């Protein structure tokens, strides 16, 4: 499709797509390492120090191509939530939010909880244990509150309470109940996003450190913990090298990626645990960021008011959710692709969106975060006008005594654990 046929995504166009038969809105972009094409990037490592690798069939490629996951669907969802939280904090958008206030509890903790804890920053959204173990009012935990009773009964056929309290759970997925004891309501993700490195070639990991004091391994010490140590007596049990307390040279060395037999992962098993093979980054031809917003998934959600269903109400709520997903996606992308240490990517072009409505003929649309926010605000106003419930003010919870004590004891253990360990 030519540039002249590209049109901006508007509230009216999105509303029409939701009410009609459009399948999805997708976004694809090509990324390169910020240091330049062909420079090394470091994917996330999983259990055993392993990268998530696989072969994929790609357009214009006869043979399968070695690929490596650079950012997972789950990680991308967290980045969208972070971007939405930042937008709320900056006053760019308003969003139903549940906040856990540790201000009073911090007086009982060794290390204050300074992070903003909300339904956008906890790991499991509305079903998270931090929310469950906090109190909606004195002596009444959130899981036992009227709020939780309302959303705990939610289903695909009645998602109104979740829409009111935590709409991001309906677009990023959630599975659970207020007390996490039963199976609970299950809501699949409506938006999925991932970043994959294409044409991956695996590198080596190098290591070296020069100790200016030139400490020697023959000098034995006793590590007493908390940064304290003493010299070991001759033959004393528990004696260790100075490297165990952070003093020593590390001779220059490297370890190399080696493909295992029959496609087995070379980082799995004993060799990985012993450090004989280490993940040393990758070079790639490019990275691809792909995101897809499923409109059929949103159409599965119904939003009855006072026990009655209305297609106009359903479409209004779905339009809010679709626009919220697009706000999170565009804001996260515009914040940049600094995925982790030594994995900073830069797009070769602006984000490109397509509306999949006519089979074989995707409609090219333009969308920035500013446009997405305008669409979202219009959708929220329309939803309120039609009677959908929407929490404009945050629901503030306070941590229960048990949750405060759990944090306090954990901090005590962490303070006494050897550096770099969990105790």
Image (spheres, rainbow, N blue to C red):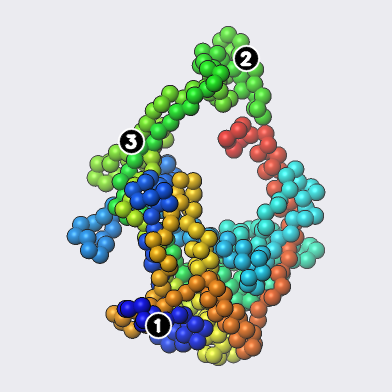
Identify the residue shown where x is 32% and y is 43%.
202
Please name whichever residue, 30 or 101, is drawn nearer the observer in this view of the structure.
30
The residue carrying mark 1 is 22
Q: Is residue 305 left or right of residue 288?
A: right
Q: Secondary structure at mark 1?
A: loop
Q: How many other residues sit within 10 Å of disc 1, few (<14), some (14-19) or many (≥20)?
A: some
Identify the residue shown where x is 57% and y is 78%.
374
Q: Earlier in the sequence, mark 3 or mark 2?
A: 2
Q: Is residue 143 visible?
A: no
Please name whichever residue, 75 or 300, is drawn nearer the observer in this view of the structure.
75
Outermost residue toward the front in this view? 4
Outermost residue toward the left in this view? 62
User: Which label was assigned to residue 256?
Assistant: 3
User: Which label was assigned to residue 231?
Assistant: 2
Residue 233: quarter of image: top right
Q: Is residue 288 above or below residue 323?
A: above
């Amino acid at each position: 499709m030519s540039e002249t046929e590209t049109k901006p995504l508007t509230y009216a166009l999105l509303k029409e797509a939701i009410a009609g038969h459009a399948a999805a809105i997708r976004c694809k972009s090509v990324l390169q390492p910020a240091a330049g094409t062909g420079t090394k990037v470091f994917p996330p490592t999983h259990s055993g120090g392993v990268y998530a690798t696989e072969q994929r069939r790609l357009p214009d490629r006869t043979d399968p191509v070695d690929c490596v996951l650079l950012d997972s669907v789950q990680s991308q969802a967290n980045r969208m939530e972070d971007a939405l939280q930042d937008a709320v904090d900056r006053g760019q958008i308003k969003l139903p939010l549940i906040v856990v206030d540790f201000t009073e509890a911090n007086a009982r903790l060794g290390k204050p909880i300074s992070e903003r804890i909300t339904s956008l920053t906890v790991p499991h959204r509305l079903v998270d244990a931090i929310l469950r173990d906090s109190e909606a009012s004195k002596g009444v935990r959130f899981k036992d509150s009227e709020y939780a009773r309302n959303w705990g009964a939610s289903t695909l056929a009645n998602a109104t309470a979740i829409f009111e309290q935590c709409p991001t759970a309906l677009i990023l997925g959630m599975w659970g109940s207020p007390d996490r004891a039963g199976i609970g309501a299950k809501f699949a993700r409506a938006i999925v996003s991932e970043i994959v490195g294409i044409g991956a070639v695996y590198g080596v990991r190098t290591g070296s450190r020069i100790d200016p004091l030139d400490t020697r391994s023959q000098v034995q010490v006793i590590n007493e913990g908390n940064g304290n140590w003493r010299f070991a007596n001759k033959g004393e049990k528990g004696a260790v090298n100075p490297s165990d307390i952070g003093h020593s040279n590390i001779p220059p060395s490297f370890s190399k990626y080696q493909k295992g037999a029959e496609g087995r992962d070379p980082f799995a098993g004993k060799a990985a645990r012993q450090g004989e093979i280490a993940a040393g980054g990758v070079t790639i031809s490019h990275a691809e960021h792909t995101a897809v917003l499923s409109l059929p998934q949103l159409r599965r959600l119904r939003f009855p008011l006072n026990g009655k269903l209305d297609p106009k109400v359903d479409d209004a709520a779905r339009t809010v959710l679709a626009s919220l997903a697009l706000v999170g996606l565009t804001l996260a992308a515009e914040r940049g692709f600094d995925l982790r240490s030594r994995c900073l990517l830069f797009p070769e072009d602006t984000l490109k969106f397509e509306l999949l409505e006519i089979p074989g003929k995707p409609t090219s649309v333009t969308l920035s975060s500013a446009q997405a926010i305008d669409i979202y605000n219009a959708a929220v106003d329309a939803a309120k006008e039609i009677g959908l419930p929407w929490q404009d003010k945050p629901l503030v919870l306070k941590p229960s005594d048990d949750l405060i004590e759990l944090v306090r004891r954990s901090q005590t253990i962490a303070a006494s654990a050897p550096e770099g360990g969990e105790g």
